[in-house]
Every structure is written in C-alpha cells, then in structure tokens.
Amino acid sequence: MPLPPRRPPNLLRRVFRPSWENLAALVRGEDRQDLSRAEARIWSLALESRRVPHRVRNLGRGWRLEVPVWYVERAEREIRRYLAENPRPQESPPPPPRPRANDLPTWLAMLALLSFHALVSRPLPSLGLYPQQWLELGQARAELLLGGQWWRAATALTLHGDAAHVLSNAVIGGIFAGLVCRELGNGLGWLLILAGGVLGSVCNALIQNPEHSSIGFSTAVFAAAAILSGLRAADGALDFRSFVVPVAAGLGILAMLGSAGENTDLGAHLMGFATGLVLGLAAGALKRAVEPPVRLQWVMGAAALALLPAAWVWAWLGG
C-alpha cells in the first residue's frame, strides 16, 4: 500500500525549525553531492520557474543546492524532469587545481619581524642608535601621523613593547598571513595584509586623541583575520548565512585575542579588522572574476617587500 503524500508543516515550523536536504545527492547519488557553479545556477532557475523553495550555497570546493525536507519529492521530480528534457553535452575535464602558495615568504617575514625587534631594542652606541630613537621616530602618534608624517602608519607595525608582544604577533600573524596567502597568493596576500595594517593605523589615528600612540604588528594581524572573513563572505554571496558566519567568526577572534590586556590598543585592532574586511570582500569579488597572473603576483610581492623598509627610509630622512 503506497504511503500518503507528505503534508507540509505549518508556518511556525517552517520559520523556526527549518530542515534542508542536499538535492544533488538525491538526484545524482551520494558520491556526487556538489554541483558546479553553472549547474547550481541552472537547477536554481528550474526550481524558481516551478516555485519550489530552495537555497544555493558555495562550499569553496563546489556548490550545493538545498531544499526544505517537505519539498524534497517535488524538487527531485522537477529536476529529473528538467534533466530528461535537457540532456547535458559531454563535460570537459575540470581545470587542474591551483598550486598552493609557498609558506616560506611568510616564515621569512615573521623571522624578519623578530630580528628587527632584536635590533632596535638594544642600544648601538657605535652607530649612535638607541631604542628610544626608533620609538620616537616610528610610533603612530596621532597628531604627527595626521600632520603629514605618514610613514608612521607603516613603521609602527614593526615596533613592539617587549619580546612577548612581538613573539605573539609573529606566531598568530604567521598563521593568519599563511592562510590569506594560500587563498590569494603571496604577492597579493601580503600586499593586502600590510595595506590593511597601514590603513588601520590611519583610521585609528582619526578616532583617537592627538596624544595617542600606537605600535605593534597586531593591527595587520587583525587585518589578515578580517581578510579571511571577507573572502569567505564573498564566496557565499548567494547565501546570507554564508555571508554572516565568516564575519561573525572574525569578530569572535577579535573579541578573544584583541580586546584584553593592559596595553591593548582596541581601536587599532578594530580599525585593522574593519579595513581588512573591506579589502577581503573586494579581493573575494575580484578573485571570482579574474585570477591575477603570476607576473602581477611578483610585482605585488615586490611592493609588499619594499613597503616597510621604504617607510623607515622616509622616517629617517623626513624626521
């Protein structure tokens, strides 16, 4: 005896207790659960034409089309009917996976950060250099930065109060920077991280009192965390939940790592996160449209490599 058709639940259950099924797994089998972007778009249009509720999610490795459980039978029937009426041509083989970015530049950058702290934190009388000189010349003092000493937005990223400060920034920053570079490549990734740190320093100076000073690479660290959140959010543009969750996760990281401690500059962390989020969203949109060529990656990498040394040259010449 055939089972009676499943009745849709009432409105309250649909709103407060949604449950979704992966339509591709039902139509094509458990071994092919994800769709290409083109397939997800076509299936979505087919269901929209029949007014079947559904949602499309970007998982990074592929796309997924999900329907409420009480519409599964109808959605599966409509998609099977569409596939029967529109047989697919022979699929071309998928493109080879993008080579993974080399982590060595990130390790070297963090080693350089530690080495620079060791250099500037000890007096060198033979050269006439003392730690206080570096601090006075490079810290992001709001009134001086906004008064035209723009190098301070970059040089402040390289200065730290003590060994524990620089070590924590090197470890956590290395993790986030490595993840960003795996998504965008070392050239674009590091250029955006440093740009987020510099812009975060400028924005922080705008909201602080004129006497406020800021140092530390943590502004760029939180920019890197926000760039990751922005990239994930941009990947989930077809799904509001996929947009919100990565940003919320990034704000959680900010709350856990960037809002405690006596000498914590919360404004710098917030501004670094905000600027990084904007850059991450823009990079995610660009990434979907075009892949930066290798030569451009090298150019951007060279610009990132020269940014901080050039800022210190400017500081010594302009100071």
Image (cartoon, rainbow, N blue to C red):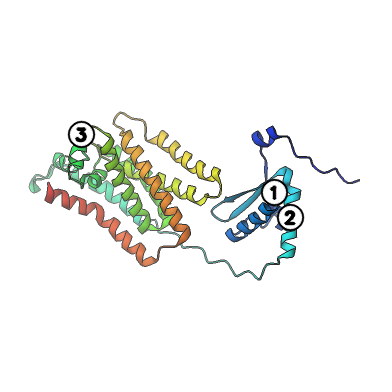
Q: In this view, does 43 lie to the left or right of 262?
A: right
Q: In which quarter of the image is residue 166?
A: top left
Circle 1 SS class? loop
User: Residue 121, can we see it?
Assistant: no
- Tag 2–tag 1 contact (CB < 8 Å): yes
Q: Name the residue under label 3.
A: 210
Q: Is residue 175 left or right of residue 67?
A: left
Give the Cα distance between marks 2 and 1.
Answer: 9 Å
Please name whichever residue, 201 or 54, is drawn nearer the observer in this view of the structure: 54
Image vertical order of residue 298 relative to residue 191, above or below: below
Question: Of label 1 and label 3, which has the lower sequence position?
Answer: 1
Q: Name the residue under label 1.
A: 52
Viewport quadrant of the N terminus: top right
Where residue 246 appears, as percent x and y from the top left, is 49, 43
* Circle nearer the viewer, 1 or 3: 1
Q: Residue at x 76, y 54 (%)?
A: 77
Q: Residue at x 21, y 41 (%)?
A: 146
Question: Of label 2 and label 1, which has the lower sequence position?
Answer: 1
User: Residue 30, can we see it?
Assistant: yes
- At label 2, the amino acid type is Glu
- At label 3, the amino acid type is Pro
Q: Residues within 10 Å of mark 2 (few under 14, many from 20)?
A: some
- At label 1, the amino acid type is Val
Q: Which residue is drawn at 72% across and 53% down?
A: 26
Give the Cα distance between marks 2 and 3.
Answer: 65 Å
Q: Name the residue under label 2.
A: 78
Where residue 67 appears, as percent x and y from the top left, is 67, 47
